[in-house]
Amino acid sequence: MDSKDVAPTKVRRYDYAAQFGDDLDELVDDLKSILLSGEYILSEEVGRFESAFADFIGVRHARATNSGTDALIVGFRAVGIQRGDEIITHANTFYATVAAIVLAGGRPVLVDADDRSFLIDIEQAKSAVTGRTRALLPVHLYGKPTPMEPMLAIGRERDLLIVEDAAQAHGASIGGKRAGSFGTFAAFSFHPSKNLSAAGDAGALVTESDDLAHAVEAHRNLGQWVQNDHRLLGINSKMDAIQARVLFTKLKSLERWTSARNEVAQAYRELLHDLPVTFQSNDLGEVHAYHLFQVRTDRRDALAEHLRGLGIDVVVRYPTPIHLQPAFSEFGWRKGEFPVAERLAQELLCLPIRPDMPESEIVFVVNGVREYFGGTPT
Ligand SMILES: Cc1ncc(COP(=O)(O)O)c(C=O)c1O
């Protein structure tokens, strides 16, 4: 947390200039050489980022794609998901988690969220396993890592793949082991909104498996390992060198940024604890990546309006749960089926959280929330 003390008049959700900091000039020089080299797609630059990201997560391989959604799709195709194979995930995730299942040919099976952690309800996930289930797909939502031991235990017992949607959880960990390193594979997003962000869409799949990493190389590259020899029905989803260079530069700061996000979150928790709001649980032994900081209140919409009026960029993630999204109407889910997900959709509000947030902005946001609830300023 930076303690520059200028009274803010607004609080943003992102500050891209701060993300580049002193690295910008060197990065721009490197981008210029990439532009002149013509080595635009995959290339050594992407290979270098893949190795660095795999090391950061603590796995053998990372394979870079055009987006986090594609990392999921390519991964499902590479592990051989067949039409009708069931994949279990939770109703309060982001659209892309479930769209990827469907686009890869699988059948999404939803369970509800846990009311405390806002993550997959593990008991419900266990009960939802059938003879057609191929995979469990927990989402480390908002940056909080899903307790993976119970998920892995269900996987071992029922012979299932465990896939992590780690799109929001770069740098999160449990017992020192990074989110993304537990499952058969994990998908990360580097969308500009994410804790590690490209200058456009980008994503990666990470895995311990040599075979899976090899299969992904063809699945992301039109089915070919060798040019013009299309061995399988692949899509076209390769990262480009410019994104890889941006990501390589930012990766060096990610650990520091995660600690800074945790400091902001801790300040919010302490300075708002006496108000009628609750927070996503924070459990012993985990590092939350705090992609988003959620406050929960049954007066969410009015609070949002109040804070927006003060210039504070709050946002709702996500206002409509998966089972009520029109795109998924073919699955016949009904209103009321996943009550926790429905309540969360009405009660959660994301306060701005950035690693570069000065104390003055944190206090400004806190006082905005306190003012709404009639509390004394901090
Ligand atoms: C939970 C979750 N899954 C998947 C994705 C898809 O990532 P992308 O936007 O890079 O396709 C995102 C990000 O948008 C996400 O938040």
Image (cartoon, rainbow, N blue to C red):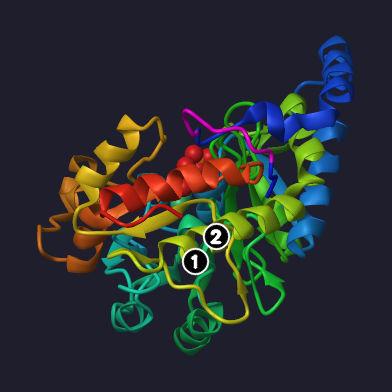
Residue tagged 2: 267
In the image, 207 versus 167, the foreground residue is: 167
In the drawing, does residue 373 fall left or right of residue 365? Answer: left
42 is higher (above) or lower (below) than 40: below
Q: Callout 1: helix, strand or loop? A: helix
* Mark 2 residue's CB less than 8 Å from ligand 1: no
Which residue is pictured at 28% across the width and 42% down the height? 304
Q: Callout 2: helix, strand or loop? A: helix
Q: Residue furthest left?
A: 335
Looking at the rendered structure, the kind of residue marked 2 is Ala
Q: Residues at badges 1 and 2 in contact (C-beta under 8 Å)?
A: yes
**How far across and down, in percent of the image, does residue 339 sit?**
17, 67
Which residue is pictured at 81% across the width and 13% down the height? 35
**How far across and down, in percent of the image, does residue 135 sit?**
45, 69
In the image, 16 versus 278, the foreground residue is: 278
Which residue is pictured at 20% across the width and 61% down the height? 343
Q: Residue furthest front?
A: 376
**Residue 163 appears in the rendering:** yes
Magenta residues span 4-11
**How far across and down, in percent of the image, does residue 371 sit?**
31, 48
Q: Main secondary structure of the magenta part?
A: loop
**Residue 100 appears in the rendering:** no
In the image, 182 versus 248, the foreground residue is: 248
